[in-house]
Amino acid sequence: MTFIPPSKDCLLCERLCAFREQNKIKFPHYYNGPVEPFGDINAEVLIVGLAPGLNGANQTGRPFTNDYAGDILYPALKEAGLAKGDYLKKKDDGFELVNVRVTNAVRCVPPENKPVTAEEKNCRSFLKQEIAAMPNLKVILCLGTISHKNVLQALGLKQSFAKFRHGSVYDTGIRGVKLIDSYHTSRYNINTGVLSYEMFQKIIYMIKDLIK
Ligand code: URA
């Protein structure tokens, strides 16, 4: 199966399209479109976030790039040898993922960072295709509950199959793929102490073990 990302002017979600049009006027130099995944389709690890941030991935056109959440995610990957180069918060910074691909459950920026259920559903077809198109996939890291929920649905699994729990690893029974949960690397979670860099780094090292 080949993965075909949404077109730059994807019209599936009325509310997200209206927001995009407003942002094109307000921020004409921003990317303002569905943000394409970052990393190789042949990677063994897929990291699934929530949705682009307005001034982060929606600006730069690369998931988590210039978003606070990327300031935790990308250094942690680099420290574990799952990324190389300097993360300079720009799409053309030359930063590279190693055996990892990063994507989002919802590919367009939602108002107030909160997609609605219908938008998750519309975008899920892309997540489903993307997972199916990764021939070497071994581990999916779900960042937060919305990612977890959408990954289960994309895999055709019931929500009762796996409860979201930071640090839990589930064998999906599909192509040998394992699912691992982490609290999202959002500014909110870091500032409130729900997640620390060290806690997240442990998750990344668990993933390294899983792909050994
Ligand atoms: N930026 C993204 O691309 N995804 C997230 O989940 C958060 C910030």
Image (spheres, grey):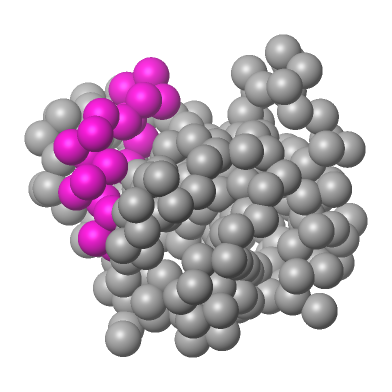
Nearer to us in this view, 147 or 63: 147
Is 12 displayed left or right of 196 in the figure? left
Expressed as whole percent of the image width and height from the top left, the position of residue 171 reads 58, 66
Predominant SS of the magenta segment: helix
Residue under the point 31% across and 71% down: 129
Q: Is residue 71 left or right of residue 29?
A: right
From where the camera sits, is residue 46 visible? Answer: no
Residue at point 74%, 75% (across, down) = 211
Q: Is residue 150 above or below residue 67?
A: below
Q: Position of residue 54 (x, y in %)?
A: 43, 30
Which residue is farthest front?
Answer: 160
In the drawing, does residue 113 fall left or right of residue 10?
A: right
Judge whether residue 115 can be spotted in this image. yes
Residue 103: x and y in percent read 48, 56
> Residue lying furthest top in this view?
192
Where residue 4 sits, quadrant-wise, is bottom left
- The residue at the point 80 percent across, 67 percent down is 208
Q: Is residue 187 magenta?
A: no
Q: Residue at x 28, y 42 (%)?
A: 120
Query: Where does the magenta region start and end?
Result: 108-127
> Residue 61 in the image: x percent, y percent?
45, 50
